[in-house]
Amino acid sequence: MRGRIFTIKKTTILRLSFIVNLLFFIASSLISFLVIKDYNLCFFMFCFFIGFHLIIKSILFKFDSSFYFGALLLFIGIFYVYCLLLNILPYYSLFVVLSFSLSSYLTGYVYKQIYHYYLSFSLFFVNIGLLLYLINLISVWIFLAIILTVVILLLCKYFTMK
């Protein structure tokens, strides 16, 4: 049957995934509140576990939107912990844009959607501009010019695609 994996219904696997991720989220929230004393970490652990659940959902039911959103939330959670461990939280906005870029790239790769590649590379160039702005190598006007150029190129590519 198409609705089963090893004689287990896909919805049962999805429910099990939800329960396991919920238990991990509760455990990580308790650790976050009681041991680490970082109250923001709870939200990012929520993003991580919901993202992981959505990726499992996309694998089971072949949903590209679920994969994109799941990968995005997963990367946002991972990059927050990464920035927290390396003490580079002022640069976290770079990693949020990088999360969008990586999610687009992976969605384009897994589901063979060419537009996600263009979106990924556009966001990567915006990320480079944001990095240059955050380390004060360019002014806000040059940064806005980079964003405007990237958006115009992305729109041109979108309207010329078949």
Image (spheres, rainbow, N blue to C red):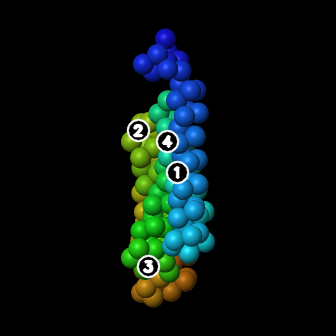
- For disc 1, the marked residue is 24
Image-based side of 109 in relation to 153, left or right: left
- Type of the residue with mark 2: Val
Element class at badge 1: helix
Element class at badge 3: loop
Q: Residue at x 43, y 85 (%)?
A: 135
- For disc 4, the marked residue is 55
The reply to whether residue 142 is visible in this rendering is: no
Q: Give me the C-alpha separation between circle 4 and circle 1.
A: 16 Å
Which label number is shown at residue 88? 3
Whichever of callouts 4 and 2 sits on the residue coming sooner in the sequence is: 4
- Residue 97 position in % (x across, y down): 50, 64
Q: Are marks 3 and 1 in contact (CB under 8 Å)?
A: no
Q: Give me the C-alpha separation between circle 1 and circle 2.
A: 27 Å
- Residue 101 position in % (x across, y down): 46, 57
Which label number is shown at residue 133? none
Task: Classify 10 Å Cα crowding around label 3: few (below 14), some (14-19), many (20 and above).
Answer: few
Mark 3 vs mark 1, foreground winner is 1
Relative to 89, does residue 162 appear above or below in the rendering?
A: above
Mark 4 vs mark 2, foreground winner is 4
Relative to 67, does residue 87 appear above or below in the rendering?
A: below
- Residue 102 position in % (x across, y down): 43, 55
- For disc 2, the marked residue is 110
Q: Residue at x 53, y 38 (%)?
A: 17
Task: Classify 10 Å Cα crowding around label 2: few (below 14), some (14-19), many (20 and above).
Answer: few
Task: Classify 10 Å Cα crowding around label 4: few (below 14), some (14-19), many (20 and above).
Answer: many
Image-based side of 140 in relation to 112, left or right: right
